[in-house]
Image: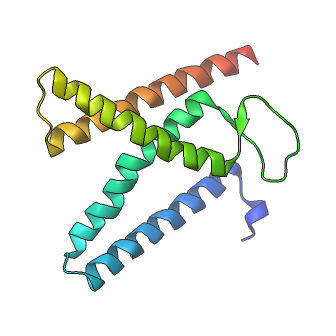
Amino acid sequence: MKWNNLSKYGKYLVSISILIIFMVLISTIIGFFSTLRYLEGFRIVFGSVYVLFIPGFILTYIFFPQTKEFDSKDKETNAIDWIERIALSFALSIAVVPLIIFYLNLIGLKITLLNSFLSILGIILVSLIILYLKNKKRQKEL
């Protein structure tokens, strides 16, 4: 199986599978070389990705819908590189997630593990809905 012969979604599926295997490997290493149990290492690695990366990654696709190829020389106004997208994902997640949680605390909702999980899930779902509607509108225009 060659990388160039895969479809666009096949490449994404292979990339995500490799990333998940890598994260499980890191969780195992954390559990093996520290006093933490395996599930605690698993929770640290996957929780960090859930809090620090995924909300911002989806938001970058809302703000910058297209990704430039690595060797692309054209200057599109609405496209960013993968490195820029990943860096901006961390920055947006670090900015948005605490703001939402602090605002929920201001209206009287206590900060607990479940409330934090659900508020981040809400950010992700609302962002995915906006992204879906934006892509649907763009497809109608073409």
Vertical relation: 19 (above or below) 33: above
Work out whether residue 92 or residue 41 is closer to the camera in this orientation and state it: 92
Closer to us: 90 or 24: 90
Q: Residue furthest right?
A: 73
**Would residue 49 be found to the left or right of residue 3 on screen?**
left
Q: Quadrant of the N terminus?
A: bottom right
Question: In the figure, 19 relative to 141: above or below?
Answer: below
Tell me where residue 72 appears, x and y as whole percent. Answer: 85, 47
Q: Is residue 88 above or below residue 64?
A: below
Picture quadrant where residue 24 is located: bottom left
Question: Is residue 137 left or right of 69 when viewed as pictured?
Answer: left
Residue 42 pos. (x, y %): 29, 66
Instruction: Give left or right: position of 84 versus 123.
Output: right
Q: Does 27 sit above or below residue 107?
A: below
Q: Residue 74 sits in which quadrant?
A: top right
Residue at the spot x=24%, y=75% of the render? 38
122 with respect to 141 (left or right): left
Residue at 24%, 30% (x, y): give it. 102
Q: Is residue 70 visible?
A: yes
